[in-house]
Image: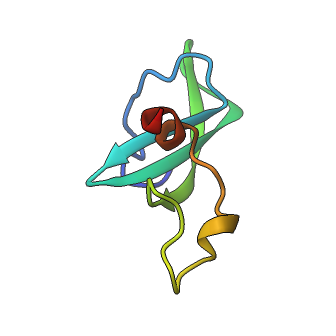
Amino acid sequence: MGGPRGGSTQDAGDQALMEIEIDGMIHRYVKTTQQHGDDGVVYNYDGMVAPGGGEPGVEEPAARVASPKADAEEQ
């Protein structure tokens, strides 16, 4: 629900947090208890973050909320 992929179908497996990279930014969707049809789960849009974390002047880079997808890609 919501966000740039609102209304579309994505294969998220059993993930509680789904992250999709669009135009260099990470868009987050959080799993809900709502069902869509017989086998679809609804995810709510949770916002957008830069893959590298906070940008100076926008938020404190050291205090950013980690992006599991971006952190995994750095390894």
Asked whether 43 or 60 is in front, the reply is: 60
Count of number-bearing discs: 0
Above/below status of 40 relative to 18: above
In the image, residue 42 lies at what x, y percent?
A: 58, 33
Which color scheme did the rendering employ for the protein?
Answer: rainbow
Above/below status of 3 relative to 55: above
In the image, residue 25 lies at what x, y percent?
A: 37, 56
- Return the residue found at the far front: 75
- Return the residue found at the far top: 38
In the image, residue 50 lies at what x, y percent?
A: 44, 60
Q: Residue at x 52, y 86 (%)?
A: 57
In the image, residue 7 lies at what x, y percent?
A: 40, 41
Hey, which quadrant is residue 60 in on the image? Answer: bottom right
Asked whether 65 or 44 is in front, the reply is: 65
Q: Residue at x 51, y 33 (%)?
A: 72
- Return the residue found at the far right: 33
Q: Is residue 15 left or right of residue 73?
A: right
Q: Is residue 68 left or right of residue 24?
A: right
Q: Residue at x 44, y 53 (%)?
A: 51
Asked whether 55 or 13 is in front, the reply is: 55
Q: Residue at x 62, y 17 (%)?
A: 14
- Return the residue found at the far bottom: 57
Asked whether 32 or 18 is in front, the reply is: 18
